[in-house]
Image (cartoon, coloured by chain):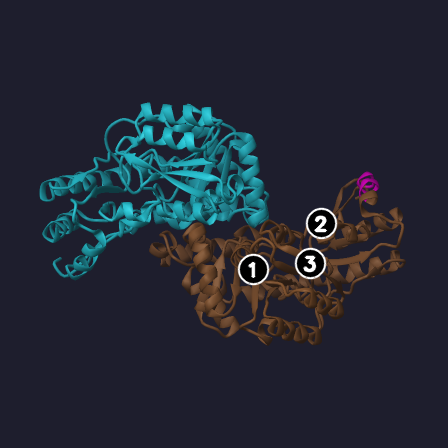
Chain colours: A cyan, B brown
Amino acid sequence: MAESIINLTRGVPPVNVFPVEDLIECGQAALQRDPSILLQYSTTGYVPLREWLGEQYGVGPDWVLTGNSSLEIFSFITQVLLSPGKRAFVESPSYDRAITLLRRAGADLVGIPLEEDGVNLSALEAELERGAPALMYVIADFQNPMGGTTSLEKRKRLVALAEEYDFWIVEDAPYRKLRYWGDDVPSMWSLSPERVLHMSSFSKVLSPGLRLGYVVGSVEIIAALSRWAMDSYICPVLPTQGMVYEYCRRGLLESNIEHLKQVYRPRLKAILSALNERIPQTTWTRPEGGFFVSGVLPEGNSVVNLQKRAREDGLKLTDGRGFFPNPADGERFLRIPFCSLSLAEIEEGVSRLARLL
Amino acid sequence: MAESIINLTRGVPPVNVFPVEDLIECGQAALQRDPSILLQYSTTGYVPLREWLGEQYGVGPDWVLTGNSSLEIFSFITQVLLSPGKRAFVESPSYDRAITLLRRAGADLVGIPLEEDGVNLSALEAELERGAPALMYVIADFQNPMGGTTSLEKRKRLVALAEEYDFWIVEDAPYRKLRYWGDDVPSMWSLSPERVLHMSSFSKVLSPGLRLGYVVGSVEIIAALSRWAMDSYICPVLPTQGMVYEYCRRGLLESNIEHLKQVYRPRLKAILSALNERIPQTTWTRPEGGFFVSGVLPEGNSVVNLQKRAREDGLKLTDGRGFFPNPADGERFLRIPFCSLSLAEIEEGVSRLARLL
C-alpha cells in the first residue's frame, strides 16, 4: 500500500460497479425489439426513454430532451441562452467544466460565494442589482466540488429571485439520487418548473461511458434546445438510449442505485471521520451524498505547493483553482473524491495528507 | 401503389439493410471484452477504433478523431476555425445542414457555383482574390445534393489553391465507399494531408442511428479539435464505438458495403434511366454512386409550386432552396434520393413526377 499511488483527483465511479451483464442483455433486447428506430436517423432522442424519464418527473416527453451527456446539453443551453457579454452566475466554487463552457459562450461570468447550505444570498442580491444574468448554474445536491446541499429555504429564495429578475436557473443534479443519509430536499425544478432547467444523467447512477444525459424543462425551451441539438447532430446516439430505456423499464435502475449507495455510504463515512480526526485544523464539508467532500486549508497553505510534495508521497491532489471563476479564490481549496477509493485507501490517503499538512 | 405516398425527400438508408444481428453480437462482444473502458469516462473516442480507422488511411490514431456524428465534428470544426465575419466557402448547392452550421458560427458564407465535375474554378479564383476563407467545405464524392464527383484535375487545383491562399479544405466523404460503377478518384486528403480535413461516418455504410463519425487530419489540428470535443462532452458515446470497432475488426464492414452496393446499384440505374426517358427536358446529373441524383427544372418551373401539386399526387419533394447559400438560386433545383426506394417505387415515382411537369 505504501508504494501505490492514491488518486484524490477524479470524480469517476469505480469500474467494478458497472452492471456489465445487465447492460449487455438490455442492449441486445432493445436492438432486437426496435432496430428500425435505434439504427435509423431520428429527429429526437429515443422517445420511449423520454417518456420514461418524463414519468419520473410527472411530465410528458415534450418536457424532456435526451442527449450525449448532460455536459453537452449544458453547452447547448449556453449557446441558446447566452451571447457574448451576457451575464452568467455560478456558485463559487463550481464544476470546472461548466465554467469552461460558460466562458466559451462568451458569458460575463460572475461567481456567487457558496456556503455549505447554498450561495450567500446577500452577495447574490447585490449582484442582481448590478445586472440580472441570462442564467444561473447551480448544483443544489451534493455540490461539485464542495459537497454541500442547498437548503430548502435558499432554493425557494433562488427561484423567487429568478422569477423576479427574469433569469433561468440551470439545476445540474447528477448526484441527487446518491443520498447516503438524511432527507431529500425538493428540487428547484419542482419549486418552479417553468423557470428552472433540471439536468441530470446516467453517468453517476449507471455508467459514464454511455454519455447519456437529459434536461427537463417547459415545452418551449425544450423545443428550442431540441432544435439546436438537431442542427448540431441530427439526433443523439440511439442504441445506448435503447439499452438504458430497457434497463430502466425492467426496474434495474432503482436496485443499481441501492447497490451504489451501499458501496459509497461507508466510504463517505470513513473519509469524513478520517479527515476530521487526522486533519482537524481544516473545516471539512459534511456531505450527505454524492462524490465529494472538500475543505479550505488553513492560511499559509497552497494546494499547488502541496501537490508537488504529495506526488512524492504517492498522493495525487486536484488544483482547486479551476473550480473558481476567480482562480485565486481557490488556492487553499481541496476537493476530495471518495467513491473510487476502498476503505483502506481512504485511511492511507488521509494519513498521507495529514502528514503533508 | 397508386395510393401510397412516394417520398423523394430524405437521404436515409432503407431500414432493411441494417445488419441487426451482427451489430447485436458485436456490441455484446465489445462490452464483454472491454467494459472498464467502454463504460467509463475517457478523454477520447475508443482508441482501438481510432487505430483501426488510422490504418485505413495509413496514419496513426493521433490523426483520427471519432465523435457522435461527422455533422457534429463539423460543428466543432466551424467553432475552432471560424469566428463571426470570417469567410467560409461552400459548393453551391451544398449539404443544407452544413450551411446551417456555418451560418451558426457567424461565417460570411460564400457559395461557389458547382458543376458536375466540381466547382467552377474561375468563380473560385475570383472569390479568393476578394478574400481567402478560413475553410472551404467540399463533398467531392457523389455530392449531396447534386450527385456529381469532383474530377482529379479540379481536386488538384483545389488543394493547390488551399496551399497558396492558406485555408483549410474540409472534405466530407460519407458516400465515398458507395461507388456503384466507375473508378475511385483519389481523395483530396490524400493529395494534401496537412491541408485537408477528411470527414466520414458509418451512417451510410452501416447505420445512421449509431451517430458515429470521424475526421482524419494532421496531428495538431486533430489535437485542437479533440480538446474542443472534450470540453464539449468529455468523451463521445463509447459502447457503440466498441460495437463498430468489433464489426470492423471482424471484416464485416467490407462485405456490408458490397451488399449495399448490390442493393443500391440497380436503383441508381433505374432512376437514371427513368428520369432521362420520361423527363428528357431536364438535364439530370450522372452520379456513379452515393444517394442522390438531381436536376434543374426548365425555366418557368418552381419546386415549391410543384411540391403542393405533387403532394396531391402522392409524391413528396424537397424544396431545393435550402441547399443554396443564396436560396433563390435553388428555386428550380430538384434533389432525388433513390436508395430507399424499390424499383417499383422508382418507376411509379418518376411517372408521377413526369406527369406533373
Quadrant of the snapshot with the N terminus of chain A: bottom left
Which labelled disc corresponds to residue B322? 2
Q: Please, which chain is the residue tagged with disc 2 on?
A: B
- Magenta residues: mostly which secondary structure? helix
Q: Nearer the viewer, mark 2 or mark 1?
A: 2
Q: CA distance from mark 3 to mark 1?
A: 26 Å
Q: Is residue B83 left or right of residue A284?
A: right
Q: Nearer the viewer, residue B285 or B215?
A: B215
Q: Position of residue B153 (x, y in %)?
A: 70, 76
Residue B310 part of the magenta segment: yes
Graded by Cα atoms within 10 Å as few (under 14), some (14 to 19) or many (20 or more), the crowding at tag 3 reads some
Q: Is residue B115 left or right of residue A196?
A: right
Residue A337 part of the magenta segment: no
Which labelled disc corresponds to residue B201? 1
Q: Please, which chain is the residue tagged with disc 1 on?
A: B
Q: Residue at x 55, y 54 (%)?
A: B75
Q: Position of residue B132 (x, y in %)?
A: 64, 65
Q: Position of residue A196 (x, y in %)?
A: 45, 30
Q: Position of residue B71 (x, y in %)?
A: 57, 54
Q: How many marks?
A: 3
Q: Which residue is mark 3?
A: B110
Residue type, label 1 = Ser
Q: Quadrant of residue B227?
A: bottom left
